[in-house]
Image (cartoon, helix red, strand yellow):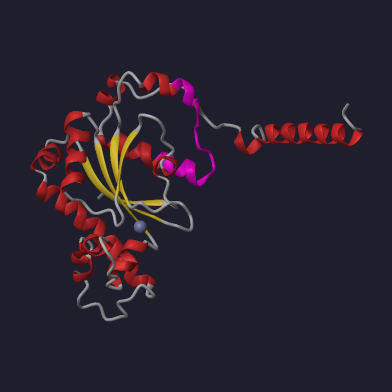
Amino acid sequence: MWSWKKLLSCALSMLCVACTHNQAVTPKNQGVQVIRNVVTEERQSQLTPDQVLNLLKEGNSRFVADMLTQRVHSEQVRLAAMGQYPKGIVLSCIDSRVPIEDVFDLGIGDIFVARVAGNFENTDILGSMEYACKVAGSKLIVVLGHEQCGAIKGAVDGVKMGNITPMLKNIQPAIQHFHNYPGIKSSKNPEFVHLVAEQNVWDTIDNIRERSPILKEMEQAGQIKIVGGMYDMNTGTVTFYDQ
Ligand SMILES: [Zn+2]
């Protein structure tokens, strides 16, 4: 037999479930779009690199405004099993505070994501980008850095530890770029960390063009675009370097 206390507790928890459910239809969430399908080959082929860039910009605006698209994952998973036609590829740092799909309001089948601490390129990343663009039809490459990056700070401070040492060497060219910097070259100087993070994005873009004739050719032919971006930890906003 249920005691009255148990009955009351049960009724209260049901009330809480109802309250939580009601939160999903508060005015703030009205206007949120719902997506059930995935990118098709036809849709991908119609998109231009600039259109994909605009989609990412619009998605980031929705992320910042708490208006993320609602996705019916069970239906998308089934549709995506038939093939993938992503719009672009993002090279990002591994930082847990930069959830790429959320940051651009994207979901299943929308985008390739390559991640390595410090968002630099290497042979494996370049191969992944060539696959994304040349084989799988993606139209945009975004090299996304972020403020307050631990990898950048570690490289700036000359951290040495196991395999982190050779990994951070990839960021050295960006640090060397500012060898005449008059201020303090330390992770405690936010301005210097920002400058190096930004330069690291530019260096990575240059290296992609230099070390991947396939991607360089595709870019020159207007088939793809390669752009940079910087994620602001405080606001969630991505500033694109696309000029
Ligand atoms: Zn980072």
Figure quadrant of residue 145: bottom left
Q: Is residue 35 visible?
A: no
The vertical placement of 127 against 207, above or below, is above
The vertical placement of 152 against 132, above or below, is below
Which quadrant is home to the N terminus?
A: top right
The vertical placement of 94 against 159, above or below, is above
Q: Residue at x 32, y 62 (%)?
A: 151
Q: For the view shown, which residue lies furthest in the right direction?
A: 4
> Relative to residue 71, is residue 156 drawn left or right?
left
> Measured from the top left, where is residue 234 in percent x and y?
48, 58
> Measured from the top left, where is residue 224 in percent x and y?
20, 37
- Give the magenta part as a residue range: 58-75
The vertical placement of 115 against 24, above or below, is below
Q: Nearer the viewer, residue 40 or 7?
A: 7
> Measured from the top left, where is residue 32 in percent x and y?
55, 32
Q: Nearer the viewer, residue 209 or 2?
A: 2
Report if residue 68 lies within the magenta region: yes
Q: Residue at x 77, y 31 (%)?
A: 14
Figure quadrant of residue 87: top left
Quadrant of ligand 1: it is bottom left
